Amino acid sequence: MAFDKLTSSDIAAWSECAARSLEPNPFFEPAWLLPAVEYLGEADAPVLVLVERNGTVECCLPLGTVGIDEEASAEGARRSSLTTMIAPDALALGTPLVTEQGGGEAIACAVGELVREALRRGSELVDMEWVGCAGPVSRLLHEAAAEQGVRLVAFDSWERAFLRRRVGEEAYWLANIGKHRRRTIRQHRNHLELAAGGRSSVRVRTDRDAVADFLALEASGWKGNEPGGLAFQRSEAGASFFAAVCAHYLDEGRMWFSSLEGDGQTIAMLCCVRCGTGTFAYRTAYDEAWARFGPGVQIFLAAMEHFDADTDAAWLDSCAARGNEHLLGLLPDRKLLATFMLRPHEP
């Protein structure tokens, strides 16, 4: 279904599916994905695949065309692929939403629709990037593809930094940090305190002004000034997307900003989103004038401690991109992600 054809009832049913999903993914929820498509969508002709049963949505994921080859083949066909990562700058996870009640039947319907849409558009592949490949949704995808005789391959797998709650263990979030690095981090924090006049602190913010402060902080550094930087405030569309998302999730009480402050200014911020049993550390920003004190590390450590002490979440997803050694060296656990490639028919 085209996004502009969705009714309020469709969106409500979609939201309910997200709330009951086997694997939480806030980035495929309506309040996140709709602004992403409106402001940042990169795929052509994006649609939402909705699997319904008795008026209840049991599975959903986005889909759009990318990679069209303008040079026609000998038969006059145009090669392309479909992707579920239709707004990559806005999304940090690509696992489809599937309810326990829908299960394998719902996934099978979705896979069938992906195949039909690929054939309709003349696409050779469907790429599903950044999908969790060690959970129930991955298993259901493989089973559904096998039952339908569709080739589904998980490749390009990689590990993302992750934190799981350990009941009864003190400071378990520091388990991956060796004693020498811990000493360095403490020294950096002490030096930051001195530079801030002994008045640095971390607070959790849920006020609307935090959004503007985060955007300004992100834009002040390399993300806002270097080619290829991904600061949302680099474009009106990016800023509008983030403002729309934050307005919804702050109102729902599912978003907050951990803010490291000192000497009358904001030093670093981390935007977090609660979804299901977990928390997603979506995006960080820091003032590069304080870079020598490791503000990115300081704010992540503060967020991990807040996760343990002040939430009941079972896990914290770093939302890091592939190859982020900085966070892999900080968080003790791992989440395995991969690209799933579905080939509707053999060439």
Image: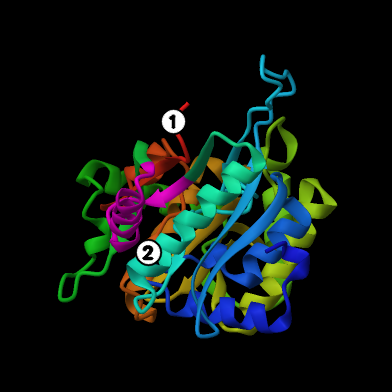
The percent coordinates of residue 5 (x first, y second) are 76, 69
- Determine if the magenta segment contains residue 137: yes
Q: Which residues are magenta?
A: 129-151
Q: Which residue is mark 2?
A: 316
Image height of 111 relative to 226, above or below = below
Q: Where 173 falls versus 296 (above or below)?
A: below
Q: In front: 176, or 66? A: 66
Q: In the rendering, at what x and y percent does residue 340 appear?
A: 41, 43
**Label drawn at residue 38:** none
Mark 1 element type: loop
Label 2 SS: strand
In the image, taking residue 166 as reference, residue 42 lies left or right, namely right
Q: Residue at x 58, y 42 (%)?
A: 119
Residue linked to disc 1: 346
Please, what is the three-letter code of the amino acid marked with disc 2?
Leu
Circle 2: is it few (<14), some (14-19), or many (20+) Cα within 10 Å?
many
User: Which residue is outermost to the top?
Assistant: 74
- Left or right of 315, for residue 75: right
Kind of residue at disc 1: Glu
Residue 271 in the image: above or below residue 337? below
User: How would you rate the neighbour count of disc 1 (Cα within 10 Å): few for under 14, some for 14-19, many for 20 or more?
Assistant: few
| Residue 197 falls left or right of residue 223 | left
* Residue 24 image-quadrant placement: bottom left
